[in-house]
Amino acid sequence: MNTELMLSEPEAGASWNHPLPVQASGGVSAGRWDPSLGRLGIGERTRTRAVAAASYRALPDSVRSAREFGVESLFAWRMPELAENLRLIVSELVGNACRHAVAADGPEHTRITLQLRPLPEQGTVVCMVADPSPKGPVRIDAHHFAESGRGLSLIAAFSREWGWGPALGHGKVVWAVCASDPL
């Protein structure tokens, strides 16, 4: 259920007018991509009360590892009610990056970085995934029996809002505001 990444188009359905830092519904700051954590080496991870970050290779096993790290972070932050939605969002965002944003030197050398920012007062977590590709995600119209192409529709359905923007230095960051009750 991964999306297809293509050149950015305004009619694709993402929140195109939201630069980083992302803005949650109502204009409340939803968090910010931390470039220093974006430089974590492959296999490195960190978690504090304010942020969790981990970097992975662009390989299929990374999706499971990122999903588990995200859920562990929610439990550490005492926000387990977001676990199901975050599992889906992390799976789609990391899966898309692993599938569509592989650097020229191969998936084992491509770094995909996950950052999570808890916003307990809003009951949300901002999920951000960086990859080296400058191409933005585009929602495609997948038919009922398609084996892929529904990822961004799922992200839109299971998050309060989502979008993407360029990462400082290279690539992009795709983000979603995860809540237990997406509006």
Image (cartoon, grey):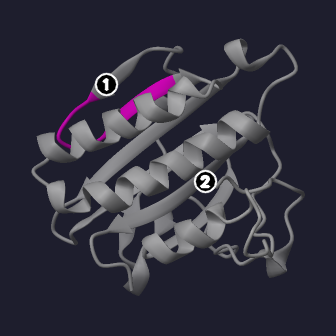
Q: Position of residue 113 (x, y in %)?
A: 53, 32
Q: Position of residue 130 (x, y in %)?
A: 60, 40
Which three-letter amino acid code belongs to the residue tagged 1? Thr
Residue 178 found in image quarter:
bottom left
Residue segment shown in magenta? 47-55
- Residue in view at x 53 percent, y 15 percent: 42
Report the side of 170 relative to 35 (left or right). Answer: right
Q: Name the residue under label 1.
A: 46
Check the image and name the residue furthest to the left: 78
Q: In the picture, which quadrant includes the N terminus?
A: bottom right
Q: How far apart are marks 2 and 1 (CA)?
A: 20 Å
On whether residue 98 falls in the magenta region, the answer is: no
Q: Where is residue 49 in the image (x, y as percent from the top left)?
A: 17, 41
- Residue in view at x 24 percent, y 40 percent: 73
Q: How many residues crowd around disc 2 within 10 Å: few (fewer than 14), some, or many (20 or more)? A: many
Which three-letter amino acid code belongs to the residue tagged 2? Val
Q: Name the residue under label 2.
A: 174
- Which secondary structure lies at badge 2? strand
Which residue is more in the foreground, 183 or 8?
A: 183
Residue 115 found in image quarter:
top left
Q: Is residue 128 above or below residue 179?
A: above
- Counting residues from the start of the chain, the first of labels 2 and 1 encountered is 1
Q: Where is residue 77 in the image (x, y as percent from the top left)?
A: 14, 46
- Which secondary structure lies at badge 1? strand
Report the side of 177 relative to 131 (left or right). Answer: left
- Residue in view at x 69 percent, y 13 percent: 108
On whether residue 51 falls in the magenta region, the answer is: yes
Answer yes or no: is residue 32 visible: no
